[in-house]
Image (cartoon, rainbow, N blue to C red):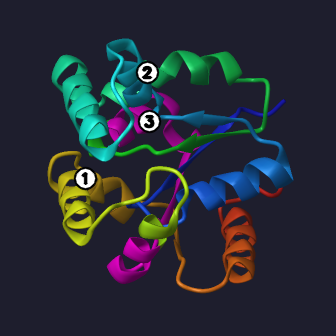
Amino acid sequence: MEKTKLLAVLGLPGSGKTEVINYIEKKYKFPNVYIGQPTFDRLKEKGLEINPQNEKIAREELRHEYGMASHAILSLPKIEKLMGTTKVILLESMYSWEEYLIFKEKYQNNFITLAINSCPKTRKKRLQNRAIRPLKNSQEFLDRDYSQIEKLNQAGPIVRADWTIINEDSLETLHKNIEKALEKLNLKTL
């Protein structure tokens, strides 16, 4: 088997990352490593409710303990276990620039990034309407965006993405754009 590629799907909350991951995972049967899982593992360890405030505290704790690359570091064992067993491993919810650098240094050209971008108005509406962890108000949305950009260094990986999909239209349009992105990133020919 050719060397396994890692495809990190990036974007701010509500951009459509999960929809993209779900589409690729279902259609191509690529495994998914959820880079954000250490946050939820920490909440479970502490017996805390899953909500945006506790998630933020847990993320910041982990980054204080392990550095800004914490979630990448804590996800490496899962990734390494899958290497060589599949053509592509999906990486969901990679955030910080430091995490990007960990993956880029370790996997070099086999680490590929796909950014999903939507305007704030679209993302806010999606987040308010989602079933899991919906946002309660405009301030919560603004606080989360600013926190992810300023404290989690999330903008760097999005800006440096190998390909970007603008997700403002229908689900059908998004799916077409995913197929185009996979083709442009040479992931359909593996």
- The residue located at (70%, 83%) in the rendering is 173
Tell me which amino acid carries mark 3: Gly
Q: For this view, does 189 lie left or right of residue 159?
A: right
Numbered badge on residue 41: 2
Query: Residue 136: percent from the left, percent from the top?
Result: 32, 62
Where is residue 183? Give x, y as percent. Answer: 74, 66
Question: Real-space Cα distance between discs 3 and 2?
Answer: 9 Å
The residue segment tinted magenta is 99-125
Give, as a three-letter code, the residue at label 1: Gln
Q: Which residue is mark 1?
A: 148
Q: Residue at x 69, y 23 (%)?
A: 82
In primary-sequence order, the first of circles 3 and 1 is 3
Picture quadrant where residue 177 is located: bottom right
Magenta span includes 122: yes
Is disc 3 surrounded by few (<14), some (14 to 19) or many (20+) residues within 10 Å? many
Q: Is residue 190 visible?
A: no
Residue 6 in sight here: yes
Read off the residue under disc 3: 36
Mark 2 or mark 1: which comes first in sequence?
2
* 170 drawn magenta: no
Instruction: Check the image and report above or below for 46 versus 19.
Output: above
Residue 84 as seen in the image, left or right of residue 121: right
